[in-house]
Amino acid sequence: MSITTFNAFRNYNYRLYFSGQSVSLIGTWMQRTGVSWVVFTMTGSPFMLGLTAFATQFPSFVLSLLGGIASDRYNRYKVLLLTQVLSMVQAVLLALLALTGKYQVWEILTLSVMLGVINAFDVPARQPMVHEMVTDKADLPNALALNSSMVNLARLIGPALSGIILQKFGAGICFSINALSFAAVITSLLLMKLPPYIAPTVKKKVARELREGFVYLRSTPSINVIMLMLALSGLLVLPYNTLLPVFAKVIFNGDAATFGYINSFIGLGAICGSVFLASLRPGTDLKLVLLINTIIFGTFLMLFSHISYFPLAMLFATITGFGMMSQTTIIMTIIQVTSDKNMRGRVMSYVAMAYFGMLPLGSLLIGAVSTLVGAPDALLCQGIIALIIAAAFSGHLRRDYLNKKEMNKMEEVEDNVLEEI
């Protein structure tokens, strides 16, 4: 492991954020796993799994542009603090509902919609906030990669804990732990020492700010092309995890713990990928890494889809997770590093719209397809589509790499000529 892997921890505020958010995300993954399992257990329907994911994610698509404007107009720290408090309230309500033992699917879907609305304002504020937590901007790519490792570490631990707790204690306790976990991230935010907030001097109309953000994206190919790649992956490939409860219960004849283990092995691969990204040397071409990891993702998703032997399937799930994690991590890194400061919130809102807009539609689509062809064949098709997306965008992703390589060669030649002179 490179000594640069944890450079971002030199920043006090980022250390606080990382520790608090890590605890909270474990709870979030416990709740996410628990909700999917409860819905599938109640209905036995892959389509209802897709509808549950849709209910959580689609509000973020509808409201993310407003969330981006709020992030650019107002104090992001206060916006983030508010969204975390509201997320805790949502978790408490879900826990109380489950503890009664008398609940229906529509009640879970309603609370999922509530969480989606909160996330619409949380994501555009939280991502750019990393800039304010990291004083040395050279540490920013490392911080973003560590953010991914934090998410994937939670994905490794949370589902496994959720599966065990669901089996032994029930959904109410699982959701209660998530509610308590928000205390960690709220405390970390309150302990931060951030520079005084300077409000924007000019506040424009909402429609004009949205138009400016769109024009900026349209005129910046280095951002809009990979956003398109993210959108296609979000629609056609990334919702594969919607069907994991079906694999746990039907393909592997397991229970909630089995479902948790599948998610955890995917998380194990994803966290290995995150550490790999965090350890890359400065100047590494991230777009080339994105291309390679997309190929890995598609290939091993295809292999996972038709393996009924659980240990081998978990090996394929781990490698699938390794390839998958770059889809969002690298794209978020490139966008945040290259976008202008005064456009960052709006750019992130468009990214959130592309991501959260496609995921719920993709979840509905994969849920419907799996009812027709079965979960294994549905996942097989998604793996094939991942390879098609990689092929379609390979020209753009490799072009930047080759151009950069050519520029480095020219610089070396110039240096040699100067040395000879």
Image (cartoon, rainbow, N blue to C red):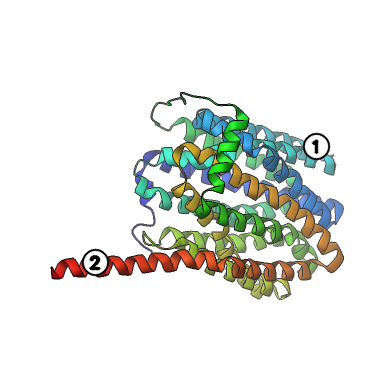
Q: Which residue bears the numbered disc 1?
A: 100
Dividing the picture into quarters, in which one does residue 132 lie?
Answer: top left
Q: Nearer the viewer, residue 68 or 13?
A: 68
**Residue type, numbered disc 2:** Glu
SS of the residue at dot 1?
Answer: helix
Q: With 421 as the anchor, is 46 left or right in this view?
A: right
In whole angstroms, how far apart are the C-alphas of marks 1 and 2? 73 Å
Are discs 1 and 2 less than 8 Å apart at CB?
A: no
The front one of 39 and 301 is 301
Q: Is residue 196 left or right of residue 274?
A: left
Residue 242 image point, x, y percent: 73, 57
| Residue depicted at x 53% and y 25% | 203
| Residue 53 seen in the figure | yes
Which residue is at 36% across, 42% downward? 11
In the rendered image, residue 160, in percent from the top left (x then y), is placed at: 63, 56
Few, some or many C-alpha atoms within 10 Å of disc 2 (few <14, some 14-19, many ≥20)?
A: few
Nearer to me, 200 or 19 = 200
